[in-house]
Image (spheres, rainbow, N blue to C red):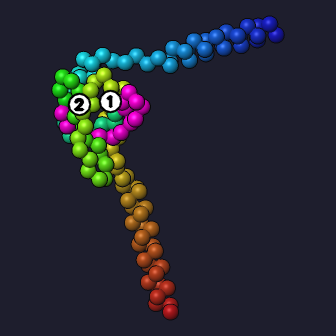
Amino acid sequence: MKNIGIALLAATIAHAAVSASSGRERQPPQAEWKTLAESIPIGTEVRIRVADGKSAVVVLMVVDDEGLVVQPATRIPEPPRRVPYDQLRQLEIAPKKRTSLSHAAGTGAGIGAATFLYVLLRLAM
């Protein structure tokens, strides 16, 4: 019983230490953000997160010494924005929005079946 108590205490202390250290994210210096941004082709959709916690999918337009110029990838066009490197917290290539072949085939089969049933129903009337 004593061993279980010691094990629980050790696990609690270890969990507290890991939780405390994970709360502090190590932010890359501006040179690392610039190197990462330069490795991404211009015109690529990227996901960024800034210091105030806001996240967005944007199109990378310009990479320079002070920061990035990005344009939000929205349905309604918005003007480009400058994001300084010191405000940047996350920069990654956004996942592509793809429709799989099986999804397209299933949709087509469903539409075809519905049309067929509609024609049969109209013929039976």
**Image vertical order of residue 37 relative to residue 105, above or below:** above
Give the numbered dot on residue 68: 2
Mark 1 and mark 2 in contact? Answer it, CB < 8 Å.
Answer: yes
Q: Compared with residue 110, is residue 71 higher up or lower down, i.e. above or below? A: above
Q: Magenta region: which residues?
A: 49-62
Amino acid type, label 2: Leu
Q: Is residue 53 magenta?
A: yes
Question: At 27% across and 31% down in the image, what residue appears?
Answer: 83
Q: Is residue 44 visible?
A: no
Disc 1/disc 2 C-alpha distance (Å) = 11 Å
Task: Looking at the picture, tell me which residue is in the foreground, 59 or 116.
Answer: 59
N-terminal of the pair, mark 1 or mark 2, is: 2
Neighbor class of circle 2 (other Cα within 10 Å; few <14, some 14-19, many 20+) is many
Q: Disc 1 marks which residue?
A: 91
Q: Is residue 37 left or right of residue 122?
A: left
Please give the name of the residue rendered at 34% of the width and 48% of the height, measured from the top-left corner: 97
Membership of 43 in magenta stretch: no
Q: Nearer the viewer, mark 1 or mark 2?
A: 2
Would residue 113 be seen by someone viewing this image from the given angle? yes
Which secondary structure type mostly characterizes the magenta part of the structure?
Answer: strand
The residue carrying pointer 1 sits among few (fewer than 14), some (14 to 19) or many (20 or more) residues within 10 Å by Cα, namely: some
Asked if 12 appears above or below 60 in the picture, the reply is above
